Amino acid sequence: MADKNGFFDLSKTTLSRRTALKGLAAGAGLALAPGFVRYSQAQSSAPIKIGFQLHRTGIGAAYGRWYDKTSAAAVKAINDAGGINGRKVELVIEDDGTDPARGAEVVGKFATQHKTDIVFGTLFSHVVIGSAPAAGENKIPYFVVSEGHHVASTKLNRYVFQPGITDVKSQIQSMAPWIAANAGKKVTQIFPDFAFGYDHRDYLPPALKAQGADVIAQIAIPPTESSFTKYFPQIPAETEVIYHVMVGPAVLTFVKELGEFYGSQRPQLFGFMDSLEAVDINSPGLEFLDGSHFWEGSPRYAQADDSAAQKAYRAAVGIDDNGAAVGDPKDISTASHMFGCWETLYVVKKAMEDAGYKGPEDRAKLVEATEALKEFAEGPEHPQGPKSFNGKIHQCFGIQNISKVEGGKLKVVHKTKIEDGLYEPEGDYTTQAL
Amino acid sequence: MRDASPAKTYALHVGVIALLFVLNFILPDYHQGLFARIMALAVFATGYNLLFGYVGLLSLGHAMFFSAGLYGAGLTVYHLGWGVPEAFVAGVACGALLALVIGLLALRTSGVAFMIVTMMFAQVFYLLILYFAAWTGGDQGLVIQQASRVISIGGASLDLTNPAVRYMSALALFSVVLLVTLAVVRSRFGRVLVAIRENEERTKMLGYDTVANKLAAVVTSGAICAASGAAYALLFGYIGSSFASVQYSILPLLWVLLGGAATTLGPLVGTLFMYYVTDITSGFTSAYLLIVGVALILLVLFAPKGILGSIRQRWLGWLP
């Protein structure tokens, strides 16, 4: 069609024939270069290839960086000890951009181009949920470290597992007895008005009810909000505990404004460490959190009673006593989640050994061997603590930590039991065909 | 446009479709899967191009039409257990209806105001998806199970999760949309749309109802984008709010600008180009979006009419 007025001509610059040809040649070269290389099938002596779906860019990048470090450390430890079934392990990394559509493409890329044995990694729920169909269709086991309830909900498929980190429903349920007994019986929840917040909105009230406590108000804050003061008058005066799970950059403003609202007379505060992962607890504005309590998956700060396994894990991953990168105190880790990468890789090792895994033709065997796992003992392979595994819902259950902010550090004051987080299974993946 | 015989034009388009058909048997597995995605999304770009390229209306809200199709198809399967064909039709109908309503309101504006109004409506649509998370799955989204993505016709069944079936389904949709678009832009209606783009006042003066024509273009564009969304949900099994975010309003604009606005094959070329630049460069650096950005800037500087637009300008004046 004619474009007489140059509607689309953004610069009016004309294109020379030579320039266009150069561009076309470069484009063709780019298209034909590495992407089209066919990858040969792994031989039995070749490394076991683990496709690592990583949040290298996008909103999950801070988590991704530490997931990368932890996984590299775990693979080094596994390889130093002889690998899996006598074969070295190799991580093949692809960035999912913290985007569900790209996540699914990456899973497909691992299965059909890199020909990895399994896919592993990734945290954000929407990426896991978006990628799960690709894993099921390619029949490639997909081990996630996401903490979402989506795996255990049995709404995904038989190829998706979460054996190295507990799910959020279990975590919330585990917190209720301690909150009711130690913090207060009248709880007001403040949470972001999207899925992460809804888990807390839906699972906390029944868990507290069972402990004789009540959620007396639920305040959902829209994700677009950048100031929170106007929501605080909605907090009932009789509130004994504020349960907060705000996440993202707004958390600093949230805490600061909550401090200005209450001054020195405040109810008890209980939060989830997800709010402050990779954020220094001593950042300006967070002083108001002093004396408050947090859920922690694995403690950020070294504790006096840390096990030898915990100490070895921290050293291998490269975090100091304050949970920051060794040599860079400002680089705060995502300690509450990243241990899941370490533990998941050891679960993969165990399951591959149990299955006598040799190559992609044994993927179904690997799925069944993983489903047959029952318990993981605390130790170098599971430094966060002991876990049980439910093969029907592909989810592990473990202990949780409750830590108090004291003198600019987090000190563990209570560890829950595995039983505190157990719930009735919502389905059974093992009935699905492989 | 230097007019070409219809045979030449149709031969080119049928040739492209035939090439895509043959590629199904040649491409390695990964690229076969990627091409299926690209063709499904090229439909989205084609729908966008109809409005942006031919009518000159720059919308920043087309994610809502794409996601109307995505959710229209996905939710009817997920909650109501509908079959694939009915769900696809529901998705397209949702997009067309939404486009009619949005068109009636947004076409009261033009230029920058049209961009802002469409973007605002898309943002409302996005927030509604989050608000009704109990049904939509919100930001986490929902999985359409494999068993629900099978078309049963008589005794036979087509499993959309099979790579070849998926590829052919995406190709079928793309082919239909491509040929329909070609027919539209060559039709009297298409020429009126271009006339509106070039000089709306003069077109009006010549006796054409420009508002009705623009509305028809918005609805057609919305329906095509919804078809892309519906296909995406059914072919790839995931629906989520990220597909309704502003990013998915910008993407078709970029694909179209890259491939060549107001060219029928430009949307496919642009989508293909951007997908492969992203895919290949992400293997070398985490700063791949920077490379994509540089590629876009270079294109704007040296080929401002996009790839096919520049080719048409220089060599193939008859390209539709």
Image: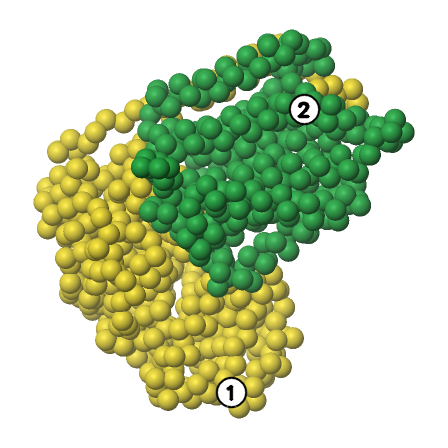
Front one among B274 and B221: B221
Residue A216 visible in the shown view: yes
Residue topped by disc 2: B185
Which corner quadrant holds the N terminus of chain A? top right
Would residue B304 appear left or right of A303 to someone viewing this image? right
Residue drawn where x is 35% and y is 69% of the image: A169
Residue under mark 2: which chain is it in?
Answer: B
Label at residue B279: none
Q: Secondary structure at mark 2?
A: helix
Residue under mark 1: which chain is it in?
Answer: A
Residue drawn where x is 28% and y is 62% of the image: A427
Q: Which chain is yellow?
A: A
Label at residue A239: 1
Q: Splitting the image into 4 quarters, where does residue A265 fall?
A: bottom right
Residue drawn where x is 66% and y is 12% of the image: B318
Chain B drawing hue: green
B273 in relation to A21, above or below: below
Percent of width and height locating residue A97:
45, 45
Would residue A6 appear left or right of A119 to someone viewing this image? right
Percent of width and height locating residue A223:
57, 62
